[in-house]
């Protein structure tokens, strides 16, 4: 009986399979089959320095290495995940920019069209945690799971439920301005003036102590960028302990 050797055919099949599963690199709109280039506008919360960047999986965050060279580098993640993150935390835009993307620019000013994500509603609202830019919340992550799909809904919620029930045109709301911080980390806390500026992935608890260890204030803020007001505290030197999930930050606070 004639012997048949199958190894070369098996090897060829494996090669074809691997070739068919090769990762595509480039703008994530094209990679995912949307047929357009995608960009993300990262000033969705209002008052942040404007920035518009292409959503891509071609270059690592460092800029000195390509994802084809090392796909484990930061910034070389899955395109679908990057697009969803943009829709959650920023504005998703498509089209062809009229100029170079980058910081201190908005996607709209570059002639791009918003197709999803958070929309900046152009007003500010005074909540118990401070003055915050009004935006839509397409995933409900900042509104206890309740989706706010349009600016009309977001503005109405401010007028109905905020501290003064007024739509403000500036980031001070007549008081302490909000200081925006990077939302990428699990928990970031900064003391400025008579407020704590908190960026957290989850709900955070706040406790304020004197240097002698006496607790003088406690409270909480929702996930996202928030301001925890210290307006009612006496002048002095304190420290605040902020906890969110497994993260804890301690900061010194000087109130004048």
Image (cartoon, helix red, strand yellow):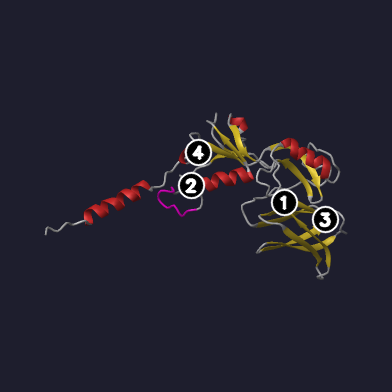
Circles 4 and 1: CB atoms closer than 8 Å: no
**Residue 124 - label:** none
Q: Please report contact status of discs 4 and 2: CB closer than 8 Å, yes or no.
A: no
Label 2, label 1: how far apart the Cα atoms are: 37 Å
Residue 239 screen position, x and y as percent: 77, 63
Quadrant in the rendering for residue 187: bottom right
Badge 1 is on which residue? 144
Tell me the mark number nearer the camera, choosing from 3 and 4.
4
- Quadrant that contains the N terminus: bottom left
Question: In the rendered structure, which disc, 4 or 2, sits on the residue that comes first in sequence?
Answer: 4
Read off the residue under disc 4.
Answer: 29
Residue 123 on the magenta span: no
Q: Secondary structure at mark 4?
A: helix
Residue span colored magenta: 66-73
x then y, percent, for residue 166: 84, 39
Task: From the image, tell me which residue sits under label 3.
Answer: 230
Nearer-N-terminus badge (4/1): 4
Residue pushed farthest bottom? 212
């Amino acid at each position: 009986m004639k012997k048949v050797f199958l190894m070369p055919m098996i090897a060829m099949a494996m090669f074809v399979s691997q070739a068919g599963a090769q990762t595509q690199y480039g703008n994530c709109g094209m990679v995912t089959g949307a047929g357009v280039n995608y960009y993300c506008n990262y000033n969705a919360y209002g008052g942040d320095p404007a920035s518009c960047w292409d959503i891509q999986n071609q270059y690592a965050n460092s800029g000195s290495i390509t994802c084809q060279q090392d796909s484990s580098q930061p910034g070389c993640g899955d395109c679908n995940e990057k697009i969803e993150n943009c829709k959650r935390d920023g504005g998703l835009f498509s089209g062809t920019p009229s100029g170079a993307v980058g910081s201190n620019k908005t996607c709209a000013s570059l002639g791009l069209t918003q197709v999803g994500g958070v929309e900046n509603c152009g007003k500010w609202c005074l909540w118990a945690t401070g003055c915050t830019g009004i935006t839509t919340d397409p995933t409900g992550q900042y509104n206890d799971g309740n989706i706010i799909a349009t600016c009309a809904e977001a503005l109405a919620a401010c007028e109905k439920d905020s501290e003064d029930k007024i739509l403000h045109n500036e980031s001070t709301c007549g008081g302490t301005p909000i200081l925006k911080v990077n939302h990428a980390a699990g928990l970031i806390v900064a003391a400025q003036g008579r407020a704590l500026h908190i960026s957290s992935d989850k709900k955070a608890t706040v406790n304020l102590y004197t240097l002698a260890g006496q607790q003088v204030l406690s409270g909480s803020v929702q996930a996202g960028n928030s301001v925890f007001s210290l307006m009612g505290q006496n002048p002095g030197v304190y420290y605040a302990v902020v906890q969110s999930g497994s993260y804890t930050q301690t900061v010194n606070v000087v109130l004048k």
